[in-house]
Image: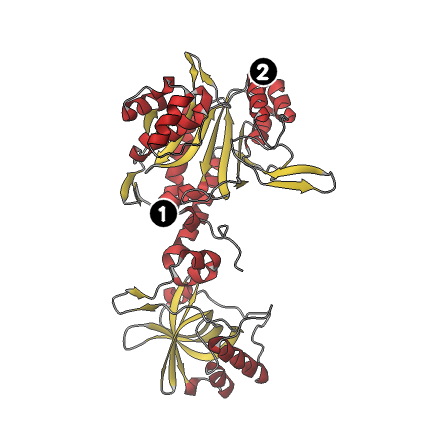
Amino acid sequence: MAIEENEFISNRLEKLAGIREMGIAPYPAHTPDRLPVENLRSIGETEEVLCTSGRIMAKRKHGKTVFCDITDQTGRIQLFINKKNLDEVGWELLGKLDLGDVILVSGTLFITRTGELSVRVETLLLLAKAVRPMPVVKTDADGEMHDSVSAPDFIYRHRCIDLMLNLDSKNRFIARSRIISAVRGYLDSENFLEVETPVLQQIYGGAAADPFVSHYNSMDEECYLRIATELYLKRLVAGGIHRVYEIGKDFRNEGVDRTHSPEFTQLELYEAWTDYNGMMTRFEDIVQAAAKAAGVGPVAKFGGHEIDLAPPFKRVPFIPALHEKSGEYLFDWDAERLSGLATRLGLGNDIRDKPALLDKLFDHYVTPSLIQPSFVVDYPVELSPLAKQKADNPRITERFEAFIAGLELANAFSEQNDPIYQREVLEKQAAQSKHRSGVVDEEFLYALEVGMPPSGGLGIGIDRLVMVLTDAMSIRDTILFPHLRREQ
């Protein structure tokens, strides 16, 4: 489909044609050596001819002098372009340039009368002609931004514009990259081995969620995008890789809201010879490393709260907390009574499963109060089929979830390594699955039957961790290309 035409695009296409008629390639394949803008700023005023490039973000004409501002990934700098310093071709080309065009310039650096470091341009090359105008955002003398681009659907669909014009967004994604690097660095320094496990799986598992369904043509069988990496990583622990992790995409065919995305990034790590207490320490260490990489001090600002990230984090037992906040011992209620309460509270009337009801009621009564970093510990066994039961109380498991400002960031277990018990749980889950038709992951169970040492496991939602450390109120603001409905 051809680019749609309006007067602005038509004008730019005419200029593009004119540039070609001048014998200038508007999209050259090669770029001469250049310095990043931040390098020019560190050099300062000099008579040496230097070369840089960037996108034109502002253009002001004063007679035979044109001032432009260009930006690259490292910063912004002003260009001073006078007709007497350019050849005729360069001056004619300048007249055909628009905001958004990508150019390369060379010249000396000087300080203007207003104190602005500027490039006195001697040569001008076009690197890419922008045929579509970008939104115009103006900044006044006080640094106040006007006409900012903030419509969520637009910036999610056209992230290139968002990154060009919204510095907070750009900085958030830079922070995201640094956070992930810091997490890797911490785990690598602790002798964890990073691995890759299958994204397409013949039997999905490791969480309770609906999968995305696909099909292997050559094998003529149904397959699934993974909902977790757990069962594969624990096979590796059984095989002798006693500290292992993966950072990658998981997929769950469920709803989209402020904290959920069908495609999300998750860290899962498994470590032998430890338990969920060891995983609490790992989580605290990871948060410290990530916060430092994101430039966040000991106190982070998120959702209007000041979050003290200093360990140790608070421990909150699941059942006592639910009893305290609800005023009822809900753990002993049957499913019908719990369902009635959920309906009266406006939490939905379609839930009949007791574990799901307890989870929903905990979210209602307790989660909003978990502002400072907290570990909710010791979940009922009904909510944690893959976790170890406590030795002194088999109704409770060694599991925690980590919360900050009411947002769940992590889930961890003392991992179940009893193959007989685990088979019973997985067979029960499989019997209730609408996809697996009673099939369990025999290869995972084989690994448990060979023998997996006592282990702790931890899963962290990277997108949500970035939300907290960059004060983003929607998970979509931490994902470069969140899923959107296609435009008609």
Nearer to us in this view, 235 or 3: 3
Q: Is residue 430 left or right of residue 338?
A: right
Q: Which residue is mark 1?
A: 473
Q: Amino acid type of disc 2?
A: Ile
Residue 164 or 260: which is nearer the viewer?
Answer: 260
Q: Residues within 10 Å of mark 1 (few under 14, many from 20)?
A: some
Q: Residue at x 43, y 15 (%)?
A: 395
* Res. 354 mark: none
Which quadrant of the rendered structure holds the C terminus? bottom right
Q: Residue furthest right?
A: 218
Q: Position of residue 360 (x, y in %)?
A: 39, 30
Percent coordinates x, y for residue 176 in the rendering: 43, 48
The quadrant in which residue 438 appears is top right
What is the x, y in percent for residue 224? 61, 38
Position of 137 with respect to 92 (left or right) is: left
Q: CA distance from mark 2 to mark 1?
A: 43 Å
* The N terminus lies in quadrant: bottom right
Q: Residue at horizontal 40%, vertical 45%?
A: 258
Find numbered disc 2 in the image and state the secondary structure of the residue it sits on.
helix
Counting the numbered discs, the total is 2
In this view of the protein, can residue 12 be seen by the observer? yes
Q: Read off the residue under disc 2.
A: 420
Image: 184 above or below 80: above
The x and y percentages for residue 172 are: 40, 52
Q: Is 162 situated above or below 326?
A: below
Q: Nearer the viewer, residue 344 or 436?
A: 344
Disc 1 marks a residue whose amino acid type is Met
**Visible residue check, residue 73:** no
Residue at disc 1, secondary structure: loop
Mark 2, other Cα within 10 Å: few <14 / some 14–19 / many ≥20: few
Q: Earlier in the sequence, mark 2 or mark 1?
A: 2
